[in-house]
Image (cartoon, rainbow, N blue to C red):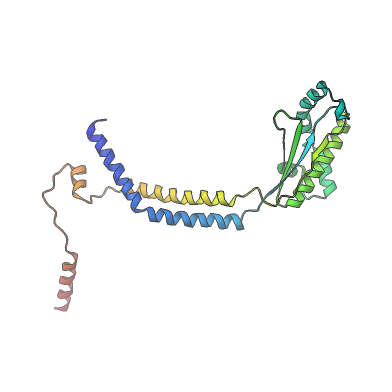
Amino acid sequence: MNTAERDEMEIDLRELFSVLKSKLWLMILIGLVVAAGAGVATKTLITPMYESTSKLYVVSKSADLTSLTLSDLQLGTQLTKDYMVLIKSRKVTEKVIENLGLNMSHEQLLGCMSISNPTDTRILEITVTYSDAYIAKQIVDEIASVASQQISEIMDMAEPNVVEDGVVSLNPVSPSLTKNVMIGGLLGVFLVAGIVCVMYLLDDTVKSTEDVQKYLAVTTIGVIPMEENKGRHAKKNKKRR
């Protein structure tokens, strides 16, 4: 790329920046409007979701924690994956639905439930996300209870201990009003900026002597100003005559 091309590119970027700067008020205005719309939509159209978590402690068949051996702990670590599969089994979910009288299917309950195992622990965290905070707590507690019983029966071992019951969450986990408002505002600003850039790049009209020299490679001798007011007065005088 030669020096002339670099100078031309710098001038174009400066002009583009100048155009964006002149439309800054419009970008801010549209950004505020879109942000306000995103906030209203978040409050009125999106259902808030709440989470409740119950924790199970995975151990081997030893019931007395004081008598646990290294092999018991290693076995408990290996069994966590089996427990996670069993908790999501149809036998557990259908029993929970029956006990609580829930109007949902096995697949729908699985969609509300998630299970995780914190690294280097024998703790299983069962989390339920639901539109009602109280029902979310009831579901997660019932899942922990039913799962403990089913695991004990199926695997012929001591029931996993419930370390922590679910709690009623006072604050929804989604949607995030602040996040949606910020994203809406940024989208509005970038949308206007994109439209301004496209209009600028597509605009090939000649507006100044610099444009004549730049695009036509012709040196201008002079500029003749247009007297719009004089032309209007002449038309008015003509009509009067």
**x and y percent of residue 99 in the render?**
85, 47
Displayed quadrant of residue 153: top right
Residue at 18% x, 49% y is 209
**x and y percent of residue 136 in the render?**
75, 48
Residue at 18% x, 74% y is 236
* Residue 162 vs residue 31, the one in the foreground: 162
* Residue 238 vs residue 221, the one in the foreground: 221
Displayed quadrant of residue 231: bottom left
**Residue at the front extreme?**
66
Residue at 44% x, 48% y is 190
**Residue at the left extreme?**
221
Quadrant the N terminus occupies: top left
**Residue at the bottom extreme?**
240
- In the displayed structure, 164 sits above or below 207; it is above
- In the displayed structure, 77 sits above or below 99; it is above
* Residue 202 vs residue 137, the one in the foreground: 137
**x and y percent of residue 205 in the render?**
25, 50
Quadrant the C terminus occupies: bottom left
**x and y percent of residue 165 in the render?**
79, 43
- How many marks are shown on the rendered structure? 0
Q: Is residue 74 left or right of residue 15?
A: right
Residue at 15% x, 58% y is 225
Query: Is residue 61 something that shows in the picture?
Result: no
Query: Is residue 16 something that shows in the picture?
Result: yes
